[in-house]
Image (spheres, rainbow, N blue to C red):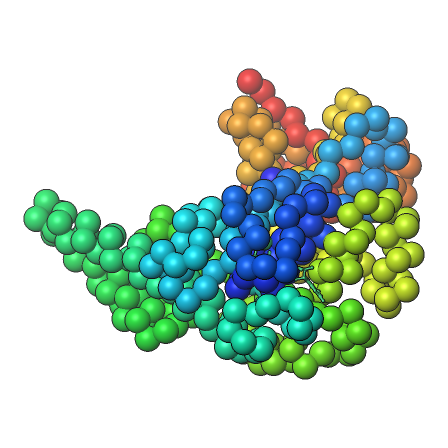
Amino acid sequence: MGFKCGLVGLPNVGKSTLFTALSSLPVERAKYPFATVEPNRAVVPVLDQRLLKVASLASSTEITPATLIIVDIAGLITGASKGEGLGNRFLAHIREMDLLLHVVRGFKAPDVPHLAGEPDPRRDKEIVELELILADLDVLERRLEKVQRSAKALPREAAAEEKILLRLHNHLSGGKTARSLDLPAKEKTVLAPLQLLTAKPVVYVVNLDEEDLSAKEPAAVKELKIMAEAEGAPVIGVCASLEGELEEMEEEEKKLFLQEYGLQETSLNRLVRVGYNFLDLITFFTIKGTEARAWTVKKGATARQGAGEVHSDMERGFIAAEVINWEELLRAGSVAAAKEQGILRLEGKEYCLQDGDVVSFRFNI
Ligand SMILES: Nc1nc2c(ncn2[C@@H]2O[C@H](COP(=O)(O)OP(=O)(O)OP(=O)(O)O)[C@@H](O)[C@H]2O)c(=O)[nH]1
Ligand SMILES: [Mg+2]
């Protein structure tokens, strides 16, 4: 499984339009706010040329790409965390996400109303962020009460956790996000189960007018980059409505269409690249029987952990992994040839998987 990302933003900023562009699923997109009521969810295959080449070399008849999950929720407005609009009910749907895509409106379109008057990337980002912070404060306060109630039974543990929670409470109350609080890794593990929204990594997606796409750095992108720098968050500019039109096109046709607008690749491809990089994810491949498949793991994952991604039995019964880089495999021509040439390595359970490895696990159950 790749990563799971959730779209957040004000109403009418083009979240559902972007969702369609990313997933090719035609969902409700409309000029009125709160067009999205029920969250939209899509499992999207990750296009990877390497997998196609490996599959072709192995004459695989079945190609299984890595996937990522995208969730599009209702727009958030001021007061969402207290039940205004529809946002609060749906914030829960993005709790389990690995990454937030915060969509900010950069397109003008006077016929598409903006809830806070004119679009203003800075203010718009802050309105949404504040709602996420308030939602986090709610979660934090509930946890604090629970910890304080358990203080009698477990005084030491409760006191240690309470201290961290209070520190974060103070930070969030100052209008700052949880991700910007500098905490030692050990203390962060205390917060992990809370799945705080503002602790999640975020990518800002500025939804631009078609004509702004050709600018080297459109003004709205520039402005967000300045703000996002403090959080170390990437910013990408897209034109969702343009790419929304691609939903029914074939890959080749899409490419030509994008080229006309000076775009090298789809937003989905860019998002995948930015997401994998930002979340420190890598891809390895397996060839088994007639199937070639891509798998996603965190950078630093061991061969044994990679085996666990494929099947828990393979992790438990792990013996060794036969490994070769995908390009070396292509050069060798086949797995058998690679073996003969002695370039197929046998690695143990602590081997650190590398991006682009083709792996065959040996295990015993
Ligand atoms: N001009 C222009 N219009 C866009 C763009 N992206 C979206 N729109 C329009 O903006 C309106 C709102 O788009 P949606 O995708 O429904 O917005 P949303 O953020 O999902 O809105 P809610 O579900 O109400 O929160 C639609 O009429 C879209 O056609 C864009 O890049 N340029
Ligand atoms: Mg929508």
Quadrant in which ligand 2 is drawn: bottom right
* Left or right: 1 in relation to 193: right
User: Which residue occupies the extreme top position in the image?
Assistant: 365
Residue at 83% across / 34% down in the picture? 55
Q: x, y percentage for residue 283?
A: 68, 46
Q: Is residue 230 visible?
A: no
Residue at 18% across / 53% down in the picture? 145
Asked which quadrant contains residue 301, the reply is top right
Residue at 63% across / 42% down in the picture? 42
Q: x, y percentage for residue 178?
A: 39, 65
> Looking at this view, is 276 or 362 the one in front?
276
Q: x, y percentage for residue 355?
A: 70, 49
Q: Is residue 302 visible?
A: yes
In this rendering, the answer to whether 302 lies above or below 224 is above
* Left or right: 357 in relation to 102: right
Residue at 80% across / 23% down in the picture? 290
> Looking at this view, is 341 or 17 the one in front?
17
In this rendering, the answer to whether 189 lies above or below 349 is below
* Left or right: 21 in relation to 92: right
> Looking at this view, is 324 or 216 the one in front?
216
Q: Quadrant of the N terminus?
A: top right
